Image (spheres, rainbow, N blue to C red):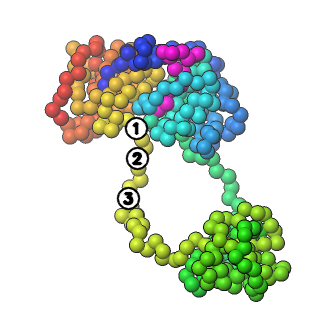
Amino acid sequence: MRKMEAEIGYSSTSHAWYPTQCPAAGDVETVENKKPEITSSSVKCPRDNGKIFMGSDGTWFYQQCCADADGAVLLNYAKVSSHDECAEACVKDKACKSFMFVPDMVPTEGTANCRLYKDGQFSTTKVDGAHYAFVVDPPTTEPILSEAKRCATTCPEADGQLYATPSGENYLMTCKARHGTTYLKIDNRPSFEACMSSCAAMPACLSADYEPRTKKCFYSTNTARPSISADAFVSAHSLGCAGACQGCKKNCDQLNGEALPVEKPECNKNNGDLVIAGGEGFRLYCGHCYRSHNSWTLEKATGIASCAKARGEDSYCHGANWIGGKLCPDGKCNALASQSRSIPEPY
């Protein structure tokens, strides 16, 4: 792992990165706020430090002012005019899980003020003038208890429930709504249940609107939820026959599968990628060993990301080797002085 001066200097193909004065927000938190406030307006630092906000597609972000990623793989750069635009750049790239924005930097041909990362989580790295946000779980509210009851075919208990007709076709029932599309026919049925069963008996019928007051059943071919609000009606649309997908793979092999680990830089997935830690860029070389005349161990490192971060915090360190695998099952981070060449190792 080697510090990449070219990645943070100026050239026609890379981007300059100049830290600016941080707003008076105090020190970066060491513990994530598990019950953060929600900000619905445009994010501003230090006002919204430790709060969460929602992106345009419903993705939620946790805002950290005066911070940058502890160790995240660089995805891309963007030139933006605001924090909101930087967040939107992250939202549009489905591989983006965190971003960093520098509000006081004006982007030019060779500079960018928004950096997107492939991974991201709560950071304890303070970087003056840079504001960091990472994807978090969406907030929740107290549930509204449903009045629905299984096997019911009258409202309000039938709302959102499935009805299996005698022919084997399943219908999703919706209270206080109707489809209102062109009808195949209209007749009278003694109940909503009878209306749905009658629809299922007709190959062309895919939906039914029922008016309990007049006992009229309106048959149609709509395959979506009813869109017209109407308290006097109850409607249903077909979801197909029970067992129609019996021959499909149902992912039974995933029933006892392990949960995916939290994403973080690792070999060989990120070999050759740029890892950002503490505002500095490091190029990751897997299966290589960085040579130096002097080295020491960075004890607090537990992986590639934390090794990069610890290296960035040590002013005497110019590169680091993360040693793991069979040679060192628990892993070890060796810091090295003065830059030297990287030599392939046989392991």
Q: Are marks 1 and 2 in contact (CB under 8 Å)?
A: yes
How far, Cα to Cα, is label 3 from label 1? Answer: 20 Å
Q: Which residue is mark 2?
A: 261
Say whether residue 26 is visible: no
In the picture shown, does residue 251 fall above or below 332?
below
Image quarter for residue 264? top left
Residue at the right extreme?
213
In the picture shown, does residue 262 fall above or below 173?
above
How far, Cα to Cα, is label 1 from label 2? Answer: 9 Å
In terms of depth relative to the viewer, which is nearer, 163 or 32? 163
Q: What kind of element bears circle 2?
A: loop
Q: Is residue 62 left or right of residue 343?
A: right
Residue numbers of the magenta segment: 106-117
Q: Residue at x 43, y 43 (%)?
A: 262
226 in magenta: no
**Classed neighbour count for the residue bearing mark 1: other residues with Cα under 10 Å, few (<14), some (14–19), many (≥20):** some
Image quarter for residue 300? top left
Q: What kind of element bears circle 3?
A: loop
Image quarter for residue 238? bottom right
| Quarter occupied by the N terminus | top left
In the picture shown, does residue 267 fall above or below 110?
below
Q: Which residue is mark 3?
A: 257
Amino acid identity at mark 2: Pro
